[in-house]
């Protein structure tokens, strides 16, 4: 299984890189597509997985699945795709539907990872759990990750995060960066 992240931001922001690093620690085979190869962070990104300037739309992949909140049923271990495509899963609140551009251009099945918007690394983790044999109803999630930055001050990330034990699956480095620099 290859996990494909269609990069949908104008650059490789620090928060993207922290999520992408976390993804590379979660799954063995990850591709990052639609990346500007002139970005100064490309060399670092290459240490996390294969990097392509092409959009996944132009790759003519066979046996691929696009994950979207408006898909046709949850991804499960009964699905046997060679590629899982993630794009625009984390973004605006409320969701802006950025994955719609991919839906319109790719002729692949659509599956969901549940009804809520996940972080990109959380989506990859959830997908890997599902294709690895877990059923969706066995997975637990926490909505609205609250990060205390100072006494009486907090930042709320308004997304859903899979739980590992009772801890949200999120990059510790991302949390530290948010505590240090605020939401960026």
Image: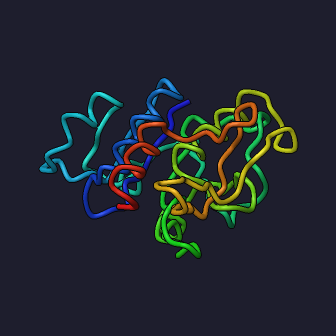
Q: Residue at 75% x, 31% y: name it.
A: 165
Q: Residue furthest front?
A: 151
Q: Is residue 151 left or right of residue 51?
A: right
- Up the image or down, 48 lies above or below 119; here it is above
Q: Residue at 52% x, 43% y: name it.
A: 121
- Up the image or down, 172 lies above or below 133; here it is below
Give how far across and how far down residue 64 sits, in percent.
Answer: 56, 45
User: Closer to the camera, 20 or 77?
Assistant: 20
Rendering quarter of residue 127: top right
Rendering quarter of residue 82: top right
Give how far across and how far down residue 32 sits, in percent.
Answer: 36, 43
User: Closer to the camera, 34 or 157?
Assistant: 157
Q: Residue at 69% x, 54% y: name it.
A: 111
Give how far across and how far down residue 70 sits, in percent.
Answer: 68, 67
User: Closer to the camera, 147 or 141?
Assistant: 147
Give how far across and how far down residue 107 sits, in percent.
Answer: 55, 59
- Up the image or down, 41 lies above or below 119; here it is above
Q: Is residue 162 left or right of residue 21?
A: right
């Amino acid at each position: 299984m290859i996990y494909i992240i269609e990069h949908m931001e104008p650059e490789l922001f620090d928060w993207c890189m922290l999520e992408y690093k976390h993804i590379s620690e979660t799954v063995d085979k990850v591709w990052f597509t639609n990346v500007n190869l002139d970005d100064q962070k490309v060399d670092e990104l290459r240490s996390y997985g294969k990097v392509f300037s092409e959009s996944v739309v132009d790759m003519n992949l066979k046996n691929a699945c696009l994950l979207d909140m408006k898909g046709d049923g949850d991804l499960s271990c009964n699905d046997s795709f060679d590629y899982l495509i993630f794009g625009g899963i984390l973004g605006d609140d409320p969701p802006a539907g950025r994955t719609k551009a991919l839906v319109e251009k790719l002729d692949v099945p659509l599956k969901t990872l549940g009804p809520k918007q996940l972080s990109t690394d959380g989506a990859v983790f959830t997908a890997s759990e599902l294709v690895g044999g877990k059923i969706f109803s066995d997975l637990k999630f926490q909505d609205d990750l609250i990060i205390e930055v100072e006494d009486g001050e907090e930042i709320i990330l308004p997304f859903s995060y899979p739980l590992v034990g009772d801890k949200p699956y999120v990059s510790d480095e991302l949390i530290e960066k948010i505590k240090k620099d605020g939401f960026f």
